[in-house]
Image: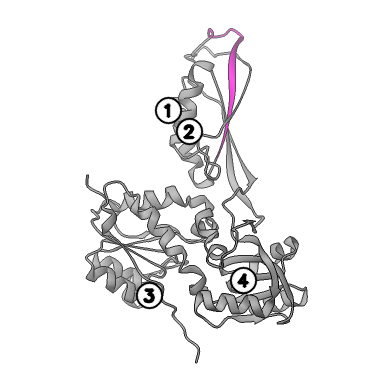
């Protein structure tokens, strides 16, 4: 089997759906030919020149990273503006990223509490997930076929569940015109037919594809397909985790434990003698999760980093903040990302190379 770049991207999106990402994010294939053949892949945290050089030396055709190569595309594809993207294309290496969609993946969100020796607990984030609601009216004879087509087009996935739909029965009424070719009923005669109302949610960027799939599978000449923007509560795929200490300790004791685990000197906000019974963890920048941590009533938020004023406000509200470094908090996600790449059909698991953790900063 000839494995392509698109197959690697498909495996990444299967594990970390694109709709889990923030709307401002850049995930998936960011540079390269989706039809190019792949025999080796390097997985790392950042798409740096050093990582790209390691991929080139390993004869890898894809560099898969947590952080995307860009959030705002370059206006011109020249070295001084396109940077790593230009270098990757020149070297024939595709760039693939799983960023905030990986942050929300349950397998990724539990890495920090598990490294700390804590039970993973429950999700911290409380944000909603934007979706499209696709509703179609279909005869009972074709309900299964249409539902399968919608699912194949990307509808019906809610968290780790697929093929999710809701169906109710009713009566459809219509009068075919003289120029129509009705599936049932006669031209010019008011008609009625048993129908199912079939509903599925879909990622908003796939809504048009789902509608097209319904048209192809539906027996009616003019199927009624209704779409609407909606939001649903996120399931287990949410950023951060809330957990509890087996035994209460002081903030100083908790920080000392974290420093040993991660091999760094944390930055700490809060009284060193504060009692710590519960902890929220989050990878990367966690300022947006401070309100959720406060609502959860935890004693400490451990994250990669929190902006100065956000950390100051959190500490002033009684929430201690422990910053271990953006990259240090996210290196544990790299093996999780690599596990998804390994599942690419036709790709030799031994051909998936994984960079070891390496903090990009130091303290004296």
- First in sequence: mark 3 vs mark 2: 3
C-alpha span from label 4 to label 3: 36 Å
Closer to the eye: label 4 or 3: 4
Where residue 116 sits, quadrant-wise, is: bottom right
Q: Secondary structure at mark 3?
A: helix
Where residue 112 sits, quadrant-wise, is: bottom right
Q: Secondary structure at mark 2?
A: helix
Which residue position is annotated with label 2? 150
**Residue ID at (63%, 57%):** 121
- First in sequence: mark 3 vs mark 1: 3
Does the magenta run of residues contain 198? yes
C-alpha span from label 2 to label 1: 10 Å
Q: Is residue 61 above or below residue 255?
A: above
- First in sequence: mark 4 vs mark 3: 3
Numbered range of the magenta stretch: 185-201
Q: Which mark is residue 302?
A: 4
Q: Are marks 4 and 2 in contact (CB under 8 Å)?
A: no
Where residue 170 sits, quadrant-wise, is: top right
Closer to the eye: label 3 or 2: 2
Q: Is residue 261 left or right of residue 291?
A: left
Q: Which mark is residue 256?
A: none
From the viewer's side, name the closer residue of 120 and 75.
120
Which residue position is annotated with label 3? 81
Q: Residues within 10 Å of mark 4 (few under 14, many from 20)?
A: many
- First in sequence: mark 2 vs mark 1: 2
Which residue position is annotated with label 1? 216
| Chief SS of the magenta region | strand
- First in sequence: mark 1 vs mark 4: 1
Q: Residues within 10 Å of mark 3 (few under 14, many from 20)?
A: few
Q: Pinpoint residue 10: horizontal percent, then vertical percent.
A: 38, 48
């Amino acid at each position: 089997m000839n494995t392509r770049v698109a197959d690697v991207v498909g495996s990444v999106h299967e594990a970390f759906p694109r709709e889990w990402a923030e709307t401002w994010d850049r995930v998936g294939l960011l540079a390269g030919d989706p039809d190019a053949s792949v025999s080796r892949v390097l997985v790392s945290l950042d798409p740096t020149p050093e990582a790209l050089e390691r991929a080139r030396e390993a004869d890898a055709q894809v560099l898969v990273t947590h952080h995307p190569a860009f959030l705002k595309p370059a206006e011109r594809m020249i070295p001084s503006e396109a940077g790593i993207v230009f270098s990757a294309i020149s070297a024939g290496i595709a760039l693939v990223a799983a960023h905030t969609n990986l942050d929300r993946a349950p397998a990724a969100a539990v890495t920090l509490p598990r490294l700390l020796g804590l039970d993973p607990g429950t999700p911290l984030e409380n944000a909603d997930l934007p979706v499209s609601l696709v509703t179609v009216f279909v005869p009972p004879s074709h309900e299964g076929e249409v539902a399968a087509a919608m699912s194949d087009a990307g509808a019906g996935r809610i968290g780790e569940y697929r093929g999710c739909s809701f169906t109710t029965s009713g009566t459809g009424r219509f009068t075919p015109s003289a120029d129509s070719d009705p599936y049932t009923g006669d031209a010019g005669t008011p008609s009625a037919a048993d129908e199912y109302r079939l509903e599925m949610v879909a990622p908003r960027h796939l809504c048009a594809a789902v509608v097209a799939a319904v048209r192809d599978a539906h027996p009616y000449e003019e199927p009624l397909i209704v779409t609407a923007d909606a939001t649903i509560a996120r399931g287990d795929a949410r950023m951060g985790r809330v957990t509890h200490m087996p035994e209460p300790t002081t903030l100083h004791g908790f920080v000392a434990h974290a420093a040993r685990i991660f091999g760094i000197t944390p930055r700490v906000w809060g009284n060193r003698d504060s009692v710590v019974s519960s902890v929220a963890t989050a990878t990367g920048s966690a300022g947006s999760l401070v309100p959720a941590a406060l609502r959860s009533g935890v004693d400490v938020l451990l994250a990669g980093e929190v902006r100065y004023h956000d950390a100051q406000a959190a500490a002033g509200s009684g929430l201690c903040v422990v910053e271990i470094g953006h990259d240090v908090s996210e290196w544990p996600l790299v093996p999780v990302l690599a596990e998804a790449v390994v599942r690419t059909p036709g790709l030799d698991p031994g051909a998936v190379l994984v960079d070891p953790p390496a903090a990009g900063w130091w303290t004296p």
